[in-house]
Amino acid sequence: MPNLLKLLGPQQMHLLDVHLGHSNPVDKSQSKQTTFRASPALLLRLASLWLTPADFGVHQDKEVVELRDKRPDVFERGAYLQYNDTPQTNTYRNDLKIINDWIDAADIDLIDGRSMARLGERRLRRVFNNGSFELGGRLFGGWWQDMNKQDRLDILIDGVPTVTLDFAQMGPRILYGMAGVSFDCEAYAVPGFEDRRPGIKKLFAAMTYAAAPLRRFPDGTASLFYRGTKVRHVTEAIQTHHEAISGLFYSGAGLAAMYRESEIMVEMLLTLKAAGIVALPVHDALIVAEDRKEEVKTVMLAVFHAQTGVDGSITEECPQRYDHCAPGPRQISRCRHR
C-alpha cells in the first residue's frame, strides 16, 4: 500500500495530493496521520465521466472467504492466513456469490431519499477463526451492518419500511443443542444477578470463548455490575444456572457455536432468495421488508430447529422510537412497536 500510494502521488502519476503527517512524541494527541485526496488532475479526468459514488465499489473478484489464525487471547483477533481451496471452501464461496448477487441486484434505499455514499457496499464475506473453517464464519460487510438500531429504521427494501428480526438468546440455544439437551430457561436471568442482564450476556459469551477461567472482567463489562463484584462470583453463578452445559464453558465452544450460527444464517439467506425475499444479515439477525416478516419468521424458525435440534425464538428489534419527536408522517409511519 505505501508503494502504491507513492506511485499515485505527486512524484509519479499526480493522481493524489499528499499531506504528510508528523509524530509528536511528547503529546500523541498532537500527532497527525498522512492523508491523501484526489488531485486536480484526477478530478479533471473524472469530470467528463459523470461518475457518482454509486459507481465505486468492491471488485467482484475480491476474496469473500477469509481465514484468521488463532487468537493470541480472547480479547484479540488473529492474523489473516493463506489457504488452499477445498470442496468446502468452494461451497462457501459459491453460496456467497449467490447471496451477494441477489443482494447486489436488490432495491435497497433509505427513507425519505436520504443519501448515503456507501449504499453500493453490499458485498458480504465470511471470516473463519483459529485456522479452522469450522470455527467462526460470521458474515461481515454491507453498509447496514455498521448502522445502529435506530438508523436501521430508515432502510427500505423494495420501497417498503423494514424490521429487524433477531434470534433471542441464540448463542445459549445453540450451545444447548450442541450438548444435546433441551433449552427451557431464561439464559441471562442468573440468580443473584437478575438485574445485571447486559453484563451476564457479555460474560456468558466470554466464558464460551475463553480456554481457561476468567481472572478479570472482559473490557467494558465490569461497569455493568455493582462496584466490588468479583468476576469469580459471577462466573460461578452462570455455571450453576447453566449446569447442563457447564462443560462447554472455557472450552472454546463459542467459536463452534458461532460457526453453527453462520451456517444457519447462510441457509436462511439462500432459502429466502429462493422465495424471492430480500434479507440483509446482521450477524444473528435479519433486516427484511415489514410486509414479508411473517414469512421470514417461519423460515428462520424452521432452519434454526433443523440445524440445532432446539426451538428458536424471534424478537423484533425495538430501539428507541420517535415518541419524543414532534408528530409527523415519518414518526407515525416508522413507529411499529407492538
Image (cartoon, rainbow, N blue to C red):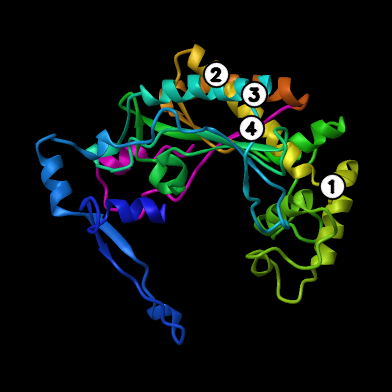
Question: Dot 2 lies on which element?
Answer: helix
The crowd level at tag 3 (other Cα within 10 Å; few <14, some 14-19, many 20+) is some
Q: Kindly identify which numbered label has been placed on residue 262.
A: 4
The part of the chain drawn in magenta is: 311-338
Q: Is residue 92 left or right of residue 189?
A: left
Amino acid at pointer 4: Ser
Residue nearer the viewer, 104 or 51:
51
Query: Where does residue 206 sit, x and y in percent of width and height?
Result: 73, 54
Circle 4/circle 1 CB separation < 8 Å: no
Give the Cα distance between marks 3 and 4: 15 Å
Query: What number is the disc on residue 19?
Result: none
Residue 37 % position (x, y): 25, 56
Give the residue type at disc 3. Leu
Residue 124 vs 117, above or below: the answer is above
Of marks 3 and 4, the one in the foreground:
4
Chain-order first, disc 1 or disc 2 = 1
Work out whether residue 338 can be spotted.
yes
